[in-house]
Amino acid sequence: MKKTNMQWGVIATATVAIVGALASPQALAKTKAKAPANEGYAAAPSTNSRVDALEAQLQAMQAELSSLRASQNRPSAEAAKVQELDEWAQSVKAKPAEAAKDHLFAVRGGWMHFNDNRGSAAGLGGSGIGQDILTSPTDSDAFYYGGAIDFNVNNDLFGLMKNTSFGIEFGVEYAELGNRKDSGLDNVITTAALGSTTNLQKSVSVNQLRINASPKVKFLHGSKFRPWLIPVGLDINIISPPSDAVTVLNTGMQFGAGAEYELFRGIVIGADGRYHHSFDNIDGVDTDGFTLGGSLGFKF
């Protein structure tokens, strides 16, 4: 604003000066015309030089005035820069913000309960024939531990719900039902074939490995406390010892719900409960059951 006022002041001053300059040559010209020819003024040549000088000065001032008017009509470099920055700021505001990702790696563990016991003492001579020969009876309870990675996909449930995240969980967990258990096959060999109760085979660990891939819906995006649920996910169960038909693998589903809380920036604790259901048993071995446990996770 100050620069603009100065420019207008210069223009006004120049205008006044031009008007004065225009008037001065005319006055001098009249004076020169009125002077008697016989008086022979010696100053006449000096007057003509002064008129020429004023005319040159008038032309210079006219050129300066034209330059000032042109600069007044042309935006300054500072004004152009300000306009450019303003346009950039508007474009940034208009651009939609990208959804923040919050992937999570967690270790977890807890208690597992199966619907049925592994192994059996029923059947012929307590051998488990017709039930589960390869595993001696074990309890239906077990402990488990493992880990999982949550991959965040979006934070608005595909545009259906605000502040609701959708992700995919890939997890693996190991469960142990019993350690150093007698093999059920040993009972068959020693009792039926040799008529002895001396164990001929080594003891076994009754365990299971479960791999899962599940869609996961987390609520309250942006909050430290976030409940979540797994509507339905895929389970792959691997058992050891194998079933009577020496089968070790089957598939099933899992359903789960839980919550997590961010203790510190990027460090998350959680608790969950899940139910696992298989479409069929593994040739007599039932892997159905539920888990209750906790987790410690790290965002990335």
Image (tube, rainbow, N blue to C red):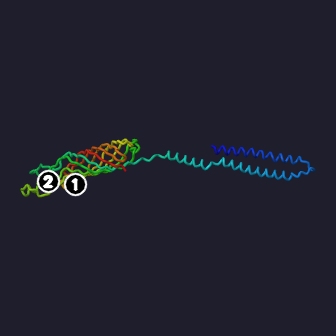
Q: Quadrant of residue 218?
A: top left
Residue at 31 percent of width and 45 percent of height: 269
Q: Which mark is residue 140?
A: none
Residue 115 visible in the shown view? yes
Which sits in the foreground, 190 or 30?
30
Residue 217 visible in the shown view? no
Which sits in the foreground, 70 or 53?
53
Residue 18, percent across and down? 76, 46
Q: Which residue is mark 1?
A: 248
Q: Which mark is residue 182?
A: 2
| View extreme (right): residue | 38
Which sits in the foreground, 26 or 31?
31
Q: Amino acid at mark 2?
A: Asp
| View extreme (left): residue | 195
Crowding at dot 1, Cα within 10 Å, few <14 / some 14-19 / many 20+, comes out as: some
Residue 58, percent across and down? 76, 49
Q: Secondary structure at mark 1?
A: loop
Residue 274, percent across and down? 27, 44
Which sits in the foreground, 107 or 30?
30
In which quadrant is the N terminus drawn? top right
Q: Nearer the viewer, mark 1 or mark 2?
A: 2
Who comes first in sequence, dot 1 or dot 2? 2
Q: Amino acid at mark 1?
A: Val
Q: Quadrant of residue 258?
A: top left
CA–CA distance in space, label 1 to label 2: 19 Å
Crowding at dot 2, Cα within 10 Å, few <14 / some 14-19 / many 20+, comes out as: many
